[in-house]
Each structure stands twice: as C-alpha cells, then as structure tokens.
Amino acid sequence: MFIEQPPKLIRALYPGAIWRMDPKEKAVYLTFDDGPIPEITPWVLDLLDKYGIKATFFLVGDNVRKHPEEFKMLLERGHRVGNHTFNHIRGFGFLTKNYLANTDKANEMIKSDLFRPPHGHMRAAQYYVLRKKYKIIMWDLVTRDYSNKLNGEQVFEKVKHYVRNGSIITFHDSLKSEENMKYALPRSIEWLLEQGYQFKLL
Ligand SMILES: [Zn+2]
C-alpha cells in the first residue's frame, strides 16, 4: 500500500502526524520498527554505537514482554522508544475499542509518547483518539528492507534515491529484514555521513 516516499495524498489522511522533520535542515532521523529481538536488535545497537548515532525504536509490546533484556539495552544506550501496538495489529482489521486496548497494553511496558501504526494505517476514529495521547510518527522514507522482492543493494539504492533533508527513515530490526537491513544499514550510514547529513533523534 505504501511506496518508499508516501505521496501528499496519503500524508493528508492523518493531519498532524509527523512524516518529515525540518526540510531546511541537513539531517535525517533513523527509526527501527518491530523489535526488540535478541537476534537483531543488539547488532543494530552496536552499529549505531560505532557511529555515535541515537535512533527511535517502535516496539511491539509482545516482543518487549518476551525480551526485557533487549528493551533495557535500548533505554540504557540512550535510544528513544515508541509504541507499535502489542501484537503488531492492523488498524483497519480491528474495532477501534480493541485497537486502542492493544495499544494501551503495549504502553504499560513501553511508556512512550510516540506511536507508529503497524502497516502505516489506522481508522480515522483510532487516529483521533491516539493523537491526543501520542505524537504520531510516520515516515518520509521506508526502505522496504523487509521485502523479499528486494536485495540489500536495492534497499541501499532506495535510501540514496529518496532521502532528503529532514527524512524520517524506517528500517526494521526483524528477522524478515535481517539480510537486507544488515547489508543496507551500514552502507546507508556511511553514505549519508559522506553527503553531510547529521543524524538526529526524534
Ligand atoms: Zn511494523
């Protein structure tokens, strides 16, 4: 449903949600969705530490429950965390009441004022309740590292092609993304630094 750089029409569905930061500033904002998991998240953290970069991780509540060590690691190493529901559920597939309950359940552990809807969508009624409690963070560039139709080199090309000032960039610390993310993330960081981008925290 979403392409790498969501068009204005899609962005307009959620007025007040944040898709991109200051377009006048040569900076990007790294975000990672769907963790934390022991197989991938620590690898990402070590890489970010190597460059002194802080990022925002949109966490699945059930993963936090299963992997409290990795959750603690994220906080201790100075990263920011956001709510990505308890079971990574689709807004359109759930009654508003149930969607909100799932989100509340996740936040009992995550305790964040940031929310990113799984799959990038919510029903309007869900959105209007959630935006009162959270800053809704979407993205300016989704790398599609999870796609089995792309390889690591192509994911890296997406970053180079679509990134711009103020981009909120989405990668995934998930098993599905492992191969592409591990290839594209370090190369993207190096390339963005060469281009003069700063890495900032939401
Ligand atoms: Zn997700």
Image (cartoon, rainbow, N blue to C red):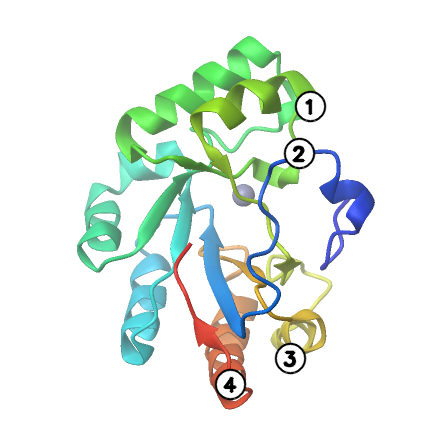
- Please tell me whether mark 3 or mark 2 is closer to you in this view: 2
- Answer above or below: position of 114 versus 202: above
Frontmost residue, 170 versus 37: 170
Rendering coords of residue 5 (x, y %): 72, 58
Q: CA distance from mark 1 to mark 2?
A: 7 Å
Question: Counting other residues with Cα less than 10 Å from the Cα at mark 3, is it few (<14), some (14-19), or many (20 or more)?
Answer: few
- Residue 92 is marked as 1
Q: Hey, which quadrant is residue 191 in on the image?
A: bottom right
Mark 2 — residue? 121
- Answer above or below: position of 185 versus 2: below
In which quadrant will I find the N terminus?
A: top right
Task: Identify residue type, mark 2.
Answer: His
- Please tell me whether mark 3 or mark 4 is closer to you in this view: 4
Task: Identify residue type, mark 1.
Answer: Phe
Q: CA distance from mark 3 to mark 4?
A: 21 Å
Mark 4 — residue? 196
Rendering coords of residue 168 (x, y %): 55, 59
Q: Residue at x 31, y 35 (%)?
A: 110
